[in-house]
Amino acid sequence: MFFHNFKYTLKALLRNKGLIFWTLAFPLIMALFFNMAFSNIEKQDKFKAINVAVVTNEYYENNTMLKETFELLSDENNKDRVFDSKYVNQDEAKELLEEEKIDGYVVFSEDSQQIIVNKNGVNQTILKFVVEEIVQAEDTADIIQEKVENIFNSREENGIMETLKSIIILLQNNSANIKDNSDANLSYMTIEFFTLVAMTCLYGGILGAVAINWCLANMSNVGKRLSMTPVSKLKMVISGTLAGYLIQLVGVALLFIFTIGILKIDFGNKTFEMVVLALVGSFAGLTMGVAVTAAIKTSENAKTGILIGFTMLGCFFAGMMGVSMKYLIDKSVPIINKLNPANMITDGFYSLYYYDTLDRFYGNICGLCIFSAIMLAIAIVSLRKQKYESI
C-alpha cells in the first residue's frame, strides 16, 4: 500500500498543471528575468579605472617593487585593473589635477608617501587605500628580506638545513593571514540567484501541502476514502510527502542546470556541499508545507497562499529584492534571519562561495535540520489530534 500510494500521489501531482507551473516552471522564468535585469545593472555599474598620476622622482625610479606594482594595477590587459596611470613630474601632476584630468597623484619618498587630491570622493578613497596597502606590503617585504639575510649570515653556525627550516617558518608566519580570495569578488547577480534557489526549495511546501490534503478526510474525497481503509495514516503521509519531495528535487535540479549550464551563473566549485544544501533546504520547505496543512484548518487555496506568502517574505528578508535588506536585517534584527529558512539556504550558498572554511555552512545546515524537525513535530501532533464525527 505504501508504494501504491507513493505512485498514485506522484501521478496526481504531475497531472496538476498549476502545481507543476509554480514548482518547476516559475523558478526558471524568474531565473531568466533575473539574468536579463541584473546583468544590465552590473554592466552599468562596471568599475572604471581611476585616473591617477605618479610622480617619477629618483626614489620611485629606483624602487622596483613600486614600479612593478603600479604597472600591474594599470595594465589594460589586467582584468583587475584599478588605475589609469600617468607617469609625470610634480609640476605636470599639479597641472593635471587642476584641470581635473586625474583624481589625484602620488609622490613617493624614502620616509613617506603623499597622496594629493583636490576633493573627497570614492575614487580618492580607493586611491588612498590602495597606496597604503602597497606601502605596507613593501615594508613587510623589507622586514622579511632583512630576516632572511640575518638567517643566512648565521648559516655557518646553524648549518644549511637549520637555515632552510628557519626561512620556511619565517615565510609561514608572515603569510598566515594571506589567502587567495578569487571567489570573494561576488557579483550582485549571483547573490540574487542564491535567493532564487532558496525560493525554489521552499516552494516544495506547496507540493507537501497538496500531498497531505489528499490524505485528510476533511479536505478531499480521496481523503475520505483513505480514512475508511485500515492503512496507517503515517504511511500514507510519508509516501505522499516522498512523492512531493522527488518532484521538488527535480525542480531544483532543473534550476541548477538552467542557471549554470545556460545562463552561465557562477555558484562556486563546492558541488557536493551545494547538493547537500539543496537536499536539506528542499526537505525544510516540504516539511513546512506539511506542518501548515496539518495544523491550520482552512481551505486548500488559503493554505497555499500562506505558504507562498511566508516563502516570499522570507526571501525578501534574505535579500531577493535587494541585498541591502539582508544586511539590514542581519544588523538590526538578526534573530529574524536566524529563524528564516530562506536566509539559511541563501547564507549557506553565500558561505560556500565566499569562505574558505565550512563552519558557517554547517551552521546553516544544522539550522535547517532543526527547522525541519520542528515542522515535522508540529505536523505529527496535529494529525494525531484530528478526529471526525462524520465523513
Image (cartoon, rainbow, N blue to C red):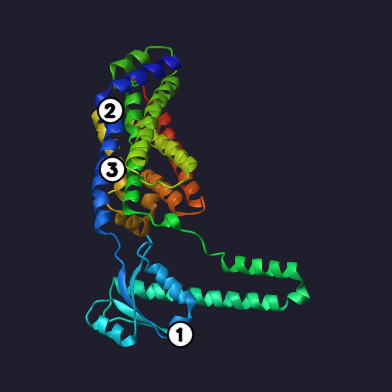
Mark pair 3, 2: CA separation: 17 Å
How many marks can you see? 3
Amino acid carrying label 2: it is Leu
Q: Dot 3: what SS? A: helix
Q: Is residue 11 visible from the viewing direction of this image? A: yes
Check disc 1 and report its element: helix, strand or loop: helix
Q: Which residue is mark 1?
A: 59
Q: Is residue 292 visible?
A: no
| Disc 2 and disc 1 in contact, CB within 8 angstroms | no
| Mark in the foreground, 1 or 3 | 1
Asked if 174 appears above or below 368 in the picture, the reply is: below
**Horizontal arrangement in the rendering, residue 192 relative to residue 168 (left or right):** left
In this view of the protein, which residue sits in the foreground, 142 or 334?
142
Q: On the image, numbered disc 3 is attached to which residue?
A: 312
Instruction: Give the image location of residue 149, x and y in percent.
Output: 65, 77
Q: Amino acid at mark 3?
A: Met
Asked whether the residues under the numbered discs 1 and 3 touch, taking CB atoms below 8 Å apart as contact, a structural biologist would say no
Q: Earlier in the sequence, mark 2 or mark 1?
A: 2
Near-viewer residue (362 or 116): 116
Query: Which residue is pictured at 29% across the width and 29% down the height?
Result: 297
193 relative to 21, above or below? below
Q: Dot 2 corresponds to which residue?
A: 19
| Residue depicted at x 77% and y 71% | 159
Q: Is residue 369 left or right of residue 145?
A: left
| Figure quadrant of the C terminus | top left
Query: For the residues carrying marks 2 and 1, which lies nearer the camera in this image?
Result: 1
Task: Name the kind of residue labelled 1 in the image.
Answer: Tyr
How many C-alpha atoms fall within 10 Å of the one at disc 3: few (<14), some, or many (≥20)? Answer: some
